[in-house]
Image (spheres, rainbow, N blue to C red):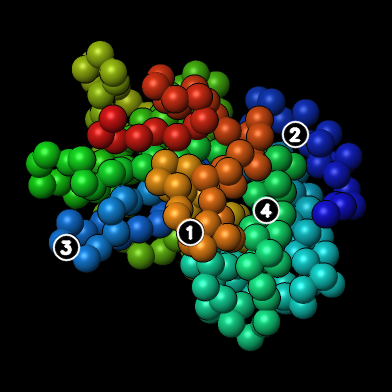
Amino acid sequence: MDFRGVDSAGKLLAQAERPAFEWAYVDETGDSGMSTGGSNTYTLACVLVPADGWTQRLDVLTQMRRLLGKRYGVRLRDEIKANYLLRSRGDLKRYSLGDGQRRDIYQTHMKSLILVSSGVFAVVIDKHKMTKLRDPSEIAWTYLMQRLRERSNQSGVPVALVHDEGEDAKIRAAHRAFRRISWDARGERVQAPYFVEDPIPRRSNDSYFVQLADLCAYAAFRRIVPPTGKAGSVCNEKMWSELGERVLAEVSTSRADGIVCWPR
């Protein structure tokens, strides 16, 4: 799909190698429960977006959505999430879209991140491998904030967290504690001085960037747990690769694809 304004978006990214400020948009896939019948994994994905040229980056996404509208009829206000694309649910239920069309919509969104994002990474918690009864979401958020802390400390760039609403109080408490008390890989106490403000909850249907984080979370899950049969017709283990150079390989010492897996 051809985006107008690709050159200008590329220039924005080139100018923002060290942005003045970054937004970290986060969403999850899977449930955090440990009961039988729930999901086997819990995944968080983080999409980093420089504040520099934020409006132009949003314009690129809006243009992408307009092009998808001309091709498939989807509206700018339609919420596009992985679950809706996989099963033609939610706002996409009104359209008669085949697997190939929904896969194209998924791929187009992932490719747009090459233009509008400064980096993407994910944390996948495999609940089947856990030997102790713990909260998968708490573990995932800890790993995610550790990576954001390291990135912001090394770059000196402040970062603000924006997440899909739901567990607002829990995420806010963890973020506040992390600013003051956390530990590095050597077990030494450190702070996260570049974490600014409290996390900001957003309804995903009001934010294209949060919707992108949702799509990345499912793509990361499928990178680790490839689908079988028809389940992979819309999103399979290759979808994550559409992010190209935007994946932050440095977040994991055991992998080079920008995904943290726990337990290993």
Residue at 53 percent across and 78 percent down: it is 89
Q: Earlier in the sequence, mark 2 or mark 4?
A: 2
Reading the image, the residue beneath label 2 is 13
For marks 2 and 4, give the CA distance.
20 Å
Instruction: Look at mark 3 in the image and give the residue it sits on.
Output: 36
Neighbours of disc 4 within 10 Å: few (<14), some (14-19), many (20+): many
Which numbered circle lies on residue 229?
1
Picture coordinates of residue 19, whole percent (x, y):
66, 31
The residue where tag 4 is placed is 107
Distance of mark 3 from mark 2, alpha carbons? 44 Å
Residue 48, x across and y down, in percent:
57, 40
Amino acid at dot 4: Gln
Q: Is residue 18 left or right of residue 179?
A: right
Helix, strand or loop under label 2? helix
Q: Amino acid at mark 2?
A: Leu
* Crowd around label 1: few <14 · some 14–19 · many ≥20 (10 Å): few
- Residue 254 seen in render: yes
For disc 2, the neighbor class at 10 Å (few under 14, some 14 to 19, many from 20) is many
Q: Disc 1 on helix, strand or loop?
A: helix
